[in-house]
Image: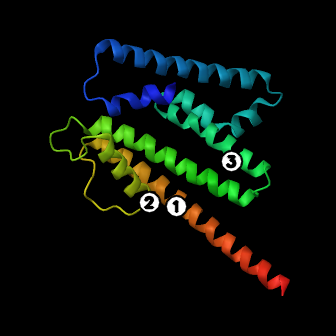
Amino acid sequence: MYLAAFSYPAFVDQISTATQNRLEVVQWSTWVLFALDLFIGIWKSSDRKSYLKSHPLEIFSVVLPFLRPLRLLRVVSFGALVIQKIAVGKQLAITFKVFLFSILIAYIAAVQITITERDVPTSNIKSFGDGLWWAVTTVTTVGYGDKFPTTSTGRILAVGLMLVGISLMGVITASVAAWFVKMSQDDSAKR
């Protein structure tokens, strides 16, 4: 529900006040649920300090409400855990998790950049498609330059996406390289 409420403004040019109010109710309601989940987790934990250290995503999404989309990473973590449990291997599960995380981050950035830049006359990001193209070229470090943010908010978002993107692509590349090395070593050991 949160992702739908968060994304809706990127797909619709004009939103009525009533719809905007409903979207805000959904978003703040999910924030309240996130906060309750965090506080219940802290309350039930035998070692509260350890719990806080091991749940930074939950803390950031409650303390900084604009980071709420990051709570969706729990779905990515669950998917990677399922892949790991069905004997595909830990390395593939990690690579899959990072790949899904990259897609989610690109999607969230595309939504946010579209909402931020759409109504700016000098902007060249006017639709979700433009925002998605910009996010994918940024996260993959291609950076064609045909779509780029013109506002200060958009540029701050771009810097964050650049830093996250280069890190994620590095992890994916390293995982694939490690997989090939392992296959080569396994072949050598069989001979």
Q: Image quadrant of residue 35? A: top right
Q: Earlier in the sequence, mark 3 or mark 1?
A: 3
Q: Mark 3 or mark 2: which is in front? A: 3
* Image: 51 above or below 167: above
Residue underneath mark 1:
169
- Distance between mark 3 and mark 2 Cα atoms: 21 Å
- Place residue 146 in its image quadrant: bottom left
Secondary structure of residue under mark 1: helix
Residue 79 image position (x, y, % from top left): 67, 43
* Relative side of 188 to 31, left or right: right
- Of the numbered discs 3 and 2, the one sitting upstream in the chain is 3
Q: Amino acid at mark 2?
A: Thr
**Residue type pointed to by label 1:** Met
Q: Are marks 3 and 1 in contact (CB under 8 Å)?
A: no
Q: CA distance from mark 3 to mark 1?
A: 17 Å
The residue sitting at 72% across, 80% down in the picture is: 184
Q: Is residue 161 left or right of residue 186?
A: left
Q: Secondary structure at mark 3?
A: helix
**First in residue order: circle 1 vs circle 2:** 2
The residue identified by callout 3 is 80
What residue does disc 2 label? 140
Q: In the figure, is residue 3 to the left or right of 187?
A: left
CB atoms of marks 1 and 2 within 8 Å: yes
Between 157 and 85, the residue placed more toward the observer is 85
Furthest-bottom residue in this view: 191
On screen, residue 73 above or below 86: above
How packed mark 3 is, by other alpha carbons closer than 10 Å (few <14, some 14-19, many 20 or more), is many
Reply above or below: 45 against 29.
below
